[in-house]
Image (tube, rainbow, N blue to C red):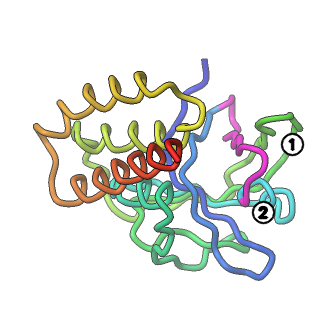
Amino acid sequence: MPFIRESIITTLHEDGSVHIAPMGVHEVGDHLMLAPFKPSATLNNLLRNGSATINYTDDVRIFAGCITGRRDWSTDQTDKIKGARLTDCLAHTEVEINRHEDDELRPRFYCKPVHEVIHKPFHGFNRAQSAVIELAILVSRLDMLADDKINSEIKYLEIGLNKTAGDKELEAWSWLINKINEHRQAETK
């Protein structure tokens, strides 16, 4: 079973603009493996550019924001690859693709780190931050999950949220709950 790091991937579109997307990064031996869904902008950018930046952040609004259409996060140019990183990340790793395996649903890109920088210390996630990340993953799969599964997960995740959330976590949570409600309304039409 691979170790998966929940992170934010930044890649460049053909016009040079930055694409920001949450993704689980798998540790596979001495490689980091990215497995974007087909179709996706991240997939297209990886195929075209052969590189990406893995951003580590404790601001869960970025995870929730990307899932709910809020992708306007500040970025800076990377150091070793042609790319971008989140300005306010705790750390980032610039990677180049060594190997690509195609798949009908999720192609796999095995990447080698070429540059890594720690910008600020990581003090760990509280339960609310973890709950927001888990809810963001659920929201990204709304079309794949039964409504009762979503409801039971929300009920469980609210326990940690209610005990430890600050303003950022509550804001991110509200974006995700609104997205779920919009999805449900669209399904009833």
- Badge 1 is on which residue? 100
Name of the residue lying farthest toward the left: 163
The range drawn in magenta is: 28-41
Q: Is residue 78 covered in magenta?
A: no
Identify the element where label 1 is drawn: strand
Seen from the viewer's position, the closer of residues 115 and 161 is 161
First of labels 2, 1 by sequence position: 2
- Badge 2 is on which residue? 45
Q: How many numbered marks, from 0 up?
A: 2
Q: Position of residue 115 (x, y in %)?
A: 62, 60
Identify the element where label 2 is drawn: helix
Image-quadrant location for residue 100: top right
User: Amino acid type of disc 1?
Assistant: His
Q: Position of residue 125 (x, y in %)?
A: 27, 42
Seen from the viewer's position, the closer of residues 76 and 165 is 165
In the image, is residue 81 above or below residue 179?
A: below
Residue at horizontal 10 percent and vertical 37 percent from the top: 163
Crowding near pointer 2: few (<14 within 10 Å), some, many (20+)?
some
Q: Is residue 40 covered in magenta?
A: yes
